Image (spheres, rainbow, N blue to C red):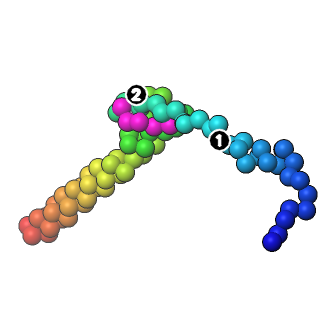
Amino acid sequence: MPVPKRKRSRARRDKRFANKGLDVKANTVCKTCQAVLLPHQVCRSCGHYKGVKVMKTKTDRLVERHAQRQALEKAKAARGSSSRD
């Protein structure tokens, strides 16, 4: 049966329990959309940081693409009606 050759020091033994005192991270609320987020982070839902828009979100990109598609369809329809004249 294996037996330890040397005594394990108090420092080595206590290293196992050193991280037991970690605290839970604090949460904050976004000023614009009231979403829960970590402190000092950009809000993922609205893209604001300290009340200033700093990041494009997925919904922003969707709205932008939709507007571009609408403009493209209008341009195609205009070209189609002008060539028929």
Q: In the rendered image of this protein, does residue 62 appear above or below residue 14? A: below
Give SS at disc 2: loop
Q: Residue furthest bottom?
A: 1
Report the amino acid beneath label 2. Answer: Lys
Give the position of the N terminus as an image quadrant. bottom right
Mark 1 is surrounded, within 10 Å at the Cα level, by few (under 14), some (14 to 19) or many (20 or more) other residues, namely few
Q: Residue furthest right?
A: 6
Q: Is residue 41 magenta?
A: no
Residue at horizontal 20 percent and vertical 64 percent from the top: 76
Residue at horizontal 82 percent and vertical 69 percent from the top: 2
Q: CA distance from mark 1 to mark 2?
A: 33 Å
Q: In the rendered image of this protein, does residue 80 appear above or below residue 39? A: below
Q: Is residue 36 magenta?
A: yes
Report the amino acid beneath label 1. Answer: Lys
Q: Report x, y in % for residue 77.
A: 15, 63
Give SS at disc 1: helix
In front of the other: 59 or 78:
59
To which quarter of the image does residue 23 belong? top right
In front of the other: 3 or 52:
3
Kindly identify which numbered label has been placed on residue 34.
none
Res 49 seen here: no
> Which callout, 1 or 2, points at the residue further toward the start of the chain?
1
Which residue is the site of mark 1? 20
Which residue is the site of mark 2? 31
**Residue stretch rendered in magenta on the structure:** 34-38
Q: Report x, y in % for residue 46.
A: 38, 40
Q: Report x, y in % for residue 6.
A: 91, 57
Question: Residues at badges 1 and 2 in contact (C-beta under 8 Å)?
Answer: no
In front of the other: 53 or 76:
53
